[in-house]
Amino acid sequence: MSPSEVRIRVLADHAALRAGLDGLSELCAQLESGREWDIGSAVDLAQVLRVQLDEHFALEDALLSPVLRTRDSWGPVRADSLEQHHAMQREQLRILDAERARAETPVSLARAFLVLIDELRVDMAFEERELLTRDVLSDDFHASDGEDG
């Protein structure tokens, strides 16, 4: 897959994830505002998002990380950072799964979801601004070894 195809694929995945995050965020906001809320729907949506996130992290690790490594002298640093961030996010998801099992109230669960949703949105924005640009993932990019001529 070419770098531009990787870019398009990851950006499409981000768009799909945002749609799911928006739905879960809306359910959580309804609960926080005191409206009736179906916790089962939120948990079901959270499970779907969990699967999507696992697949998304695997996609970025398999496609984006290797391409980043070849871009320039910062490529390995970018790729390592991406992979470390994914490991941290997987741990956050594991913790959220445990919290969901022992949540004292639906409101506390909603707040935990909202924190994760905000972090994921920030992370996707960072990736789009720093890693998924046309400059970084250009098909005609040629890594330089820093020597002229």
Image: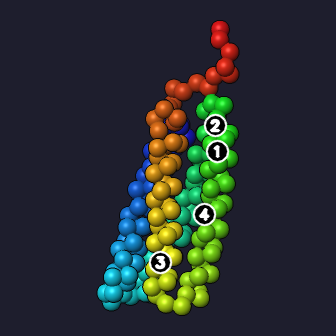
- Quarter of the picture holding the N terminus: top right
The answer to whether the residues at label 2 and label 4 have Cβ atoms under 8 Å apart is no
Going by the numbered disc 1, the residue's amino acid type is Ala
Q: CA distance from mark 2 to mark 4?
A: 21 Å
Task: Name the N-terminal-most of marks 4 and 3.
Answer: 4
The amino acid type, in three-letter code, at marker 3 is Arg
Residue 88 occupies quadrant: bottom right
Q: Between disc 1 and disc 4, whose residue precedes?
A: 1
Label placed on residue 16: none
In percent of the image, x 36 and y 77: which residue is there?
A: 29
Q: Quadrant of residue 87?
A: bottom right
Three-letter residue code for mark 2: Gly
Q: Residues within 10 Å of mark 1 (few under 14, many from 20)?
A: many
Dot 2 or dot 4, earlier in sequence: 2
Up/down of 71 relative to 123, above or below: above
Q: Which mark is residue 111?
A: 3
